[in-house]
Every structure is written in structure tokens, then in C-alpha cells.
Image: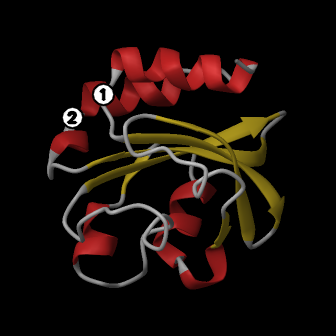
């Protein structure tokens, strides 16, 4: 098990999610999945590329310093879910995106998806995910 997979497994012990992933920022508009875990993780998720150019809510969330809940962006069909083509997620599911930074620079993201709605609304939960991992 890689160190990234270990981190994701540790997060899943704290926060229930059907899919947890760490994505690396390849360039200004592209993220690439580098590790995934959870019941919905599959080989199709590994190395998936996510186009931020068609996901303005996700891109805006990653510009901030704290995790953001993205349920409304998918439910209102404002933008496609990053995993829509490879994972059977309903349009109305819980989605959280946390920016990962190194030296103040965005290097990637951690996403958590859960088939149920309204799970990631807790301020305590958002603070916990935002404070860990510390990069």
C-alpha cells in the first residue's frame, strides 16, 4: 500500500465516504487521480483526468483554503461530477473537495463522495478535513 493510499484509508476511518481520492494538479486546468479508496474505487478511477475548465465550482473551491461542499453544483447540473463517467454516483449525492497545498501553492485535491445527500454540511467535519492532512 502506498503512502497516499494509507492517508486515504485513515481519512475513511474518520469520515464515511463511498469514494475518497487524492488528485494531483497536472496543470492549471487538469487534475489526475493518483490514489483512490472506498467501496466505489475501481481501476477506472485510477489515473482519471479531471478537466477543471468545465468544472468552475470545483476550480473555485480549490482556489480557497478550506474544503468546500459541491452538492449544489452537481444536483443543479451546473457542471458534471468528476467521476460521473466511471462511478455510478447519483446526481444528488454528497461531494466534498479539499485543496491540497504545499508552500502555499495548490498541488492537488482530496475529494470525498457519498451516495447520500447532506452529509458534508457540518462545520466541524469541514474543519477536521481542512486541518488534515497538513499540506
Question: What residue sits 61% from the left and 50% below the top?
Answer: 43
Taking depth in this image into account, of 83 and 128 the one nearest to the observer is: 83
Instruction: Place residue 29 in its image quadrant.
Output: bottom right
* Percent x, y of residue 58: 51, 65
Residue 49 appears in the picture as rendered: yes
Which mark, residue 125? 1
Q: Name the residue at 50% across, 15% down.
A: 10
Asked whether residue 66 is in view, the answer is: no
Quadrant in which residue 93 is drawn: bottom left
Real-space CA distance between mark 2 and mark 1, rounded to the nearest whole angstrom: 5 Å
Secondary structure under tag 1 reads helix
Circle 1 crowding by C-alpha within 10 Å: few under 14, some 14–19, many from 20? some
Q: Is residue 28 left or right of residue 125?
A: right
Q: Name the quadrant of the C terminus.
A: top right
From the viewer's perspective, tell me whether residue 78 is left or right of residue 55.
Answer: left
Q: Is residue 119 left or right of residue 46?
A: left
Q: Circle 2: is it few (<14), some (14-19), or many (20+) Cα within 10 Å?
A: few
Image point (33%, 73%), residue name: 73
Mark 2–mark 1 CB contact (< 8 Å): yes
x%, y% of residue 95?
A: 34, 53
Above or below — where is 99 with respect to 128? below
* Residue 13 locus on image (x, y percent): 38, 15
Residue 86 pos. (x, y %): 49, 66
In-front residue for pair 43/38? 43
Q: How is the image coloured?
A: secondary structure
What residue is shown with label 2? 122
Above or below 111: residue 124: above
Q: Is residue 95 left or right of residue 43?
A: left
Amino acid at each position: 500500500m502506498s503512502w497516499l493510499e494509507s492517508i486515504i484509508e485513515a481519512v475513511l476511518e474518520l469520515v464515511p465516504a463511498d469514494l475518497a481520492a487524492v488528485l494531483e494538479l497536472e496543470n492549471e486546468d487538469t487534475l489526475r487521480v493518483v490514489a483512490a479508496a472506498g467501496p466505489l474505487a475501481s481501476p477506472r478511477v485510477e489515473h482519471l483526468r479531471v478537466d477543471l475548465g468545465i468544472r468552475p465550482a470545483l476550480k473555485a473551491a480549490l482556489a480557497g483554503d478550506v474544503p468546500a461542499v459541491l452538492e449544489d453544483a452537481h444536483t443543479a447540473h451546473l457542471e458534471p461530477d468528476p467521476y460521473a463517467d466511471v462511478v455510478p454516483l447519483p446526481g444528488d449525492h454528497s461531494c466534498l473537495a479539499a485543496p491540497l497545498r504545499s508552500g502555499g501553492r495548490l498541488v492537488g485535491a482530496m475529494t470525498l463522495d457519498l451516495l447520500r445527500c447532506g452529509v458534508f454540511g457540518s462545520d466541524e467535519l469541514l474543519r477536521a478535513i481542512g486541518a488534515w492532512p497538513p499540506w
